[in-house]
């Protein structure tokens, strides 16, 4: 009896995990020359699915990720651009701007004004609109947080911009 209980608990847990991973895995990839551990577990771009990111015009995209600085970070700058046909197009209003206001402590969700401590886990979250004037193209979103010239975290996500829903 006890075994049956255990087995069904495991099965339920496994199926919850499967549903979770199918809907919440963002197909994030390493930036060139970088190697951050557990990238896929740490990065979530909504509404991405395992199959990819379809970013519909007139909707918002949410980016949430966890990172752990190896050294104390005094300045943290968003370095965000779309790579379209091999060309980097900066996300105006995001790139070059301080990322500190978007950072909270993972432990309790409290705001984490810079400087950030080495070895502590932080959560970054940001929301940006998919503007109607964006072209319908395949692109790669390149998202990095820079401390000086160093990447504190960096990832790329393949995406496609799709037309707005017809009314
Ligand atoms: C997108 O986010 C902005 C700012 O948070 C909000 O004002 C707007 O209503 C959102 N748009 C959609 C389509 O959810």
Image (cartoon, grey):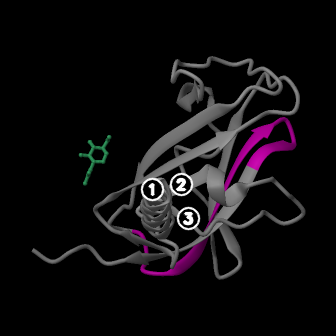
Residue 26 numbered mark, or none? 3
Q: Main secondary structure of the magenta part?
A: strand
Quadrant in the picture for residue 148: top right
Seen from the viewer's position, the closer of residues 141 and 71 is 71
Placement of the N terminus among the 4 image quadrants: bottom left
**Mark 3 surroundings within 10 Å by alpha-carbon count, few (fewer than 14), some (14 through 19), many (20 or more):** many
User: Residue 81 location in percent, x, y?
Assistant: 63, 59
Q: Residue at x 65, y 60 (%)?
A: 40
Q: Which residues are the magenta region?
A: 134-153
Marks 2/3 in contact by CB < 8 Å: the verdict is yes
**Residue at the left extreme?**
167
From the viewer's perspective, is 61 left or right of 114? Answer: left
Placement of the C terminus among the 4 image quadrants: bottom left
Compute the Cα span from label 1 to label 3.
27 Å
Choose mark 1 or mark 2, whichever is in front: 1
Residue 125 numbered mark, or none? none
Query: Which circle's residue, 1 or 2, is located before the other in the chain?
Result: 1
Q: Determine whether 124 is above or below 2 in the image.
A: above
* Residue beneath disc 1: 9
User: SS class of the residue under badge 1?
Assistant: helix
User: Residue 93 location in percent, x, y?
Assistant: 52, 44
User: Is 142 included in the stretch rendered in magenta?
Assistant: yes
User: Residue 166 location in percent, x, y?
Assistant: 15, 77
């Amino acid at each position: 009896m006890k075994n049956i209980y255990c087995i069904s608990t495991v099965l339920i847990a496994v199926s919850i995990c499967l549903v979770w991973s199918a809907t919440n895995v963002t197909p994030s990839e390493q930036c060139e020359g970088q190697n951050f551990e557990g990238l896929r577990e740490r990065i979530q771009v909504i509404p991405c699915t395992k199959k990819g990111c379809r970013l519909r015009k007139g909707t918002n995209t949410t980016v949430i990720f966890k990172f752990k600085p190896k050294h104390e970070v005094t300045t943290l700058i968003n370095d965000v651009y779309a790579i379209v046909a091999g060309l980097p197009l900066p996300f105006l209003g995001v790139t070059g701007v301080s990322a500190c206001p978007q950072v909270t402590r993972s432990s309790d969700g409290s705001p984490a004004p810079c400087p950030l401590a080495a070895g502590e886990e932080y959560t970054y979250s940001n929301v940006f609109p998919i503007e109607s004037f964006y072209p319908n193209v395949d692109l790669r979103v390149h998202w990095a947080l820079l401390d000086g010239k160093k990447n504190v975290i960096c990832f790329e996500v393949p995406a496609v911009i799709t037309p707005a829903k017809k009314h």
